[in-house]
Image (spheres, grey):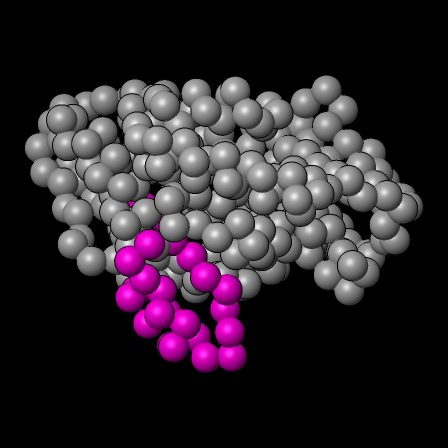
Amino acid sequence: MTGVQTCALPILTPALVVAQDDLPAPQWHDAIERIRAAIADGGLRKVVAARARGVELARAIDPAAVVVELGRRQPACTRFAIARGGATFVGASPERLIRKRGRAIDSEALAGSCARSGDDVAAAAALLASGKDRGEHRWVVEAIEAALAPRCAALAVPAVPVVRTLRQILHLHTPITGELDRDRHVLELVAALHPTPAVGGTPTADAVAWIARHEPARGWYAAPVGWFDGDGDGEFAVAIRSGLIAGARATLYAGAGIVGESDPEAELAETELKLRALSGALGLDDVR
């Protein structure tokens, strides 16, 4: 008689925060107003602004335990962990960039969001009725369609988004499916799609140039993360709701799409919601 060996999953235990570094709210407001001014001047329509929060805990962080906790808290998301040079980049992304199986592909637009409330039905209806969020979402859909259509024999793009529900937040969501015109490597599709307006802005080149001039380096935040096989099939997500762990220190990242109508305080609140995806997985929900 043989027994079945099981491996116990690492357990995350809360830890005290001994230091925290945040961009002061006035500096965030100034950054958003600069983006709005650039949009008003013409050329730019949207720029995705990112925040980084540094947190130092009283003990070393176990990345494996964080990934397990992310799976418990964000079961509908793609978890990832990449260890390199003594640090581990971890996250639970709600946004698929591309998946390819043979000639079948699927992607998605995920842009436009609001906090969950006591009445998700009312919040979802308000999100679907928001001209700002629907416009921002449409730019992402159009960019994905423009990248994939020339490479596809067929492409299905719904005309109206639906609402996707996550732990803390509601997102406008449009699933996009297609059939390639010929066999192509998934990395070709990744290169054509990244960065979408959901993480860069629009027009893409101008928005990315603005980010490079005005923000500190983002590292791997919002980069494509995934896998591919020998046939060129694979799947990549967008590395949002993520952070970099090194010893007892973690740097958490969150972004918000800024358009002409954006309110700096509302966008700050949105990034707080997104930061909670990883701060909760670090055991900080009941500490901060």
Eyeballing the image, is 168 above or below 47? below
Q: Which residue is drawn at 64% across and 33% down?
A: 89
Residue 185 location (% of width, % of height) = 29, 21
Q: Could one spot residue 279 in this view of the protein? A: yes
- Furthest residue to the bottom? 119
Q: Which residue is drawn at 58% across and 44% down?
A: 29
Find the magenta span and give its range: 106-132
Q: Which residue is drawn at 83% across and 41% down?
A: 56
Residue 139 location (% of width, % of height) = 27, 41
Q: Could one spot residue 107 in this view of the protein? A: no
Reply yes or no: does residue 123 show up in magenta.
yes
Instruction: Give left or right: position of 202 versus 3.
Output: left
Instruction: Give left or right: position of 179 versus 12.
Output: left
Q: Quadrant of the C terminus?
A: bottom right
| Location of residue 23 (image quadrant) | top right
Residue 95 location (% of width, % of height) = 42, 45
Instruction: Give left or right: position of 108 versus 153.
Output: right
Q: Residue at x 52, y 20 (%)?
A: 213
Q: Quadrant of the N terminus?
A: bottom right
| Location of residue 84 (image quadrant) | top right
Residue 2 location (% of width, % of height) = 68, 53
| Location of residue 40 (image quadrant) | top left
Instruction: Give left or right: position of 93 versus 7.
Output: left
Eyeballing the image, is 223 above or below 257? above
103, 115: nearer the viewer: 115
Reply yes or no: does residue 174 show up in magenta.
no
